[in-house]
Amino acid sequence: MLKKRLIPCMLLQNGQIVKSIGFSDYQIIGNPKIAIKFFNAWSVDEIIFLDISREKEYTKRIRTDYNFKMLYSFAEIVLECAKICFVPLTAGGGIKTIDDMLVLFKSGVDKVCINTYAAKTPNLITESARKFGSQAIVVSIDVKKKSNGKYEVFIAGGSESTGLDPVNWAVKAQKLGAGEIFLNSIDKDGSLSGYDLGLIKSVTSAVNIPVIACGGVGKWQDLVDGIKIGNAIAVSAANIFHFTEQSTKHAKKYMVDSGIDVRI
Amino acid sequence: MHFCKKCVYPSASAVKLTFDEHGVCSGCRVAEEKKKIDWDKRSKMLKDLAQKYRARNGGNYDCIIPVSGGKDSYFQTHYVTKVLRLKPLLVTYHGNNYLPEGEYNLSRMRQVFDVDHIIFRPSEKALIKLNRICFKKMGDMNWHAHCGIFTYPVQIAVKFKIKLIVWGEHGYMDLGGMYSLNDFPEMTAKYRFEHACRGFDWYDMVGDEGLREQDLFWAKYPSEKELEESGVRGIYLGNYVDWDANVHYKLVQKLYGWQEARQPFERTYRRFSNLDDMHENGIHDYLKYIKFGYGRATDHACKDIRAGYITREKGIEMVRKHDYVKPRRDLERWLKYIGMREAEFDRIADTFRDPRVWRKNKKGKWEKDNIWDEK
């Protein structure tokens, strides 16, 4: 059986890695290249970069007395990071077209992650899968629970509703050629209260492609639950891996101790 | 450039900020969290944590406390010895520029607390070189201190196999709201390298002015392997205790005779901060003003506004009074210490002005947006 994967998700806003709470409150962690340098050594299986900038200004929050080069675009950041990244790198955020993907692939990423424009123009999934192969196309799905208890897919950084049901949408994305689903919960984002396991289970039981669970991890046991209860093939988190020394390494050790087959 | 609507931080601050839809900075938002925390519960959590790290059979120190001898050091040591009842080893990186009051406080720690204390003092020659090199390289003569403070205690922890380090406040969380109080961030090699040392490390200094690796042993952080094998963990007391510098300094004054600065500083109104390095509130801080357009008075005003000690109006008054001041007394001492002329200092300092903050007016003078002109 394939090993389970642990994937830190790096949220990038205006060129800086940020922490996110509820898709609305952000705190700045720091430089993406430095993060890669450390996570490389902390036994992660992959890294996902998501550019969640609202405006395309990549240097305004950067100190000029840092020993780091100013990078002026997401592609440039990805290019610099891919050079030093030892594990597969996925990049997403603001991808609208095949050409956008080409820029990122040329910058050295292994997979691209699409969200808003996958929903707006589903044909983009098919076209990109045909061109780059399904294994390189990750469809990201952001989900919010409505007041009636039903789940709905949101796009544009959680700001636009779609009327789509996450299970139906994941099944459709698979049919269209997606290689993986990156499943995030807007309500759980930054809550530290654990994954929305019901949501994850409903999607993993409906599709055959790998589902990467994200959103809400507050302790290492949550990662174990995502795999054991949610049946996710891979588990991801953004905030928590920035809190402690060798975080992902400790998380992996915990997963091994809990009987999960991961590379260490 | 704009300013936080609650405190006095500018948008282009050294500690990176995000702003919410009301124009309030992340530092203020995290300070608000403090009021909602159940601090009794936190104190219980810390006691449980301390229990795990208590050395078995008294075979080692229970923890390390990195100290400068300042009010926070006294408070940390007070808390660790009197509340947690642990046996700490105090470790100090001494950067050679203590104020006499700071030196007095530092030397008394082993007397008032019944603790052992390692004070590490690098070669003065090497330090003078580092002052000069780092001023030219990054506009910060005190880089050696940021590096030493964040490195040497961790080296000692690894060497003596002491698994717990108790730091004070998480600086970037307190000032800029880098994390939430619910995140319990701990000290990491990444934080040291990226934020304390700003991407520079000991090897960037080798070769400059003849500095050798041998001059910089104290600046070498333990490797990933050493960190993993030793299991050393650095926690912040600020995650477990309702941190209030204004309360703490009075407490340690009363209990232990801790002394604040006798002479006021030129660049800030507080007298109880940064006694471990006279330039930290002086010429080092003036460079922060050159770079980012604000200084220590802004930092202190932000802390005091958030904690409810002064109003924003009063804070702005302090910023206006102190931020621009070129500290004569302190500058002259430093120029003499490292052997540089003022004209050269000014010329190099000007190369670090952030274009997002500073512009030259028609008369060729540097100017910037000021908080008191804001509508």
Image: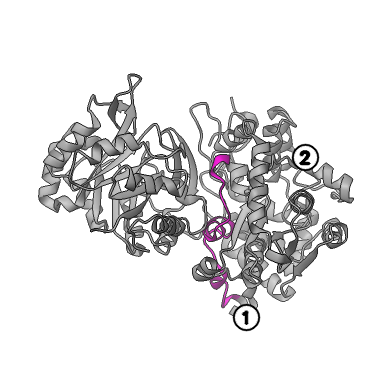
Q: Is B5 placed above or below A70 here?
A: above
**Residue A159 visible in the displayed image:** no
Crowding at label 1, few (<14), some or many (≥20) Cα neighbours within 10 Å?
few
Checking the image for residue B7, the label placed there is none
Crowding at label 2, few (<14), some or many (≥20) Cα neighbours within 10 Å?
some
**Residue B234 visible in the displayed image:** yes
Q: Quadrant of the C terminus of chain B?
A: top right
The answer to which quarter of the image holds residue A177 is: top left
Q: Residue at x 59, y 44 (%)?
A: B173
User: Do marks 1 and 2 both belong to one polypeptide chain?
Assistant: yes
N-terminal-most mark, 1 or 2: 1
Instruction: Give how far across and how far down residue A130 sits, in percent.
Output: 10, 49
Q: Which residue is mark 2?
A: B246
Left or right: where A172 falls relative to B106: left
Q: Secondary structure at mark 2?
A: helix
Q: Secondary structure at mark 1?
A: helix
Range of the magenta residues? Answer: B181-208
Q: Residue at x 53, y 29 (%)?
A: B23
Left or right: where B45 falls relative to A43: right
Q: Magenta includes B182?
A: yes
Q: Which residue is mark 1?
A: B214
Q: Magenta includes B241?
A: no
Of B2 and B367, nearer the camera is B2
Q: Is A159 placed above or below B246 here?
A: above
Mark 1 belongs to which amino acid? Answer: Gln
Mark 2 belongs to which amino acid? Answer: Asn
Instruction: Give how far across and how far down residue A211 sits, in percent.
Output: 26, 45
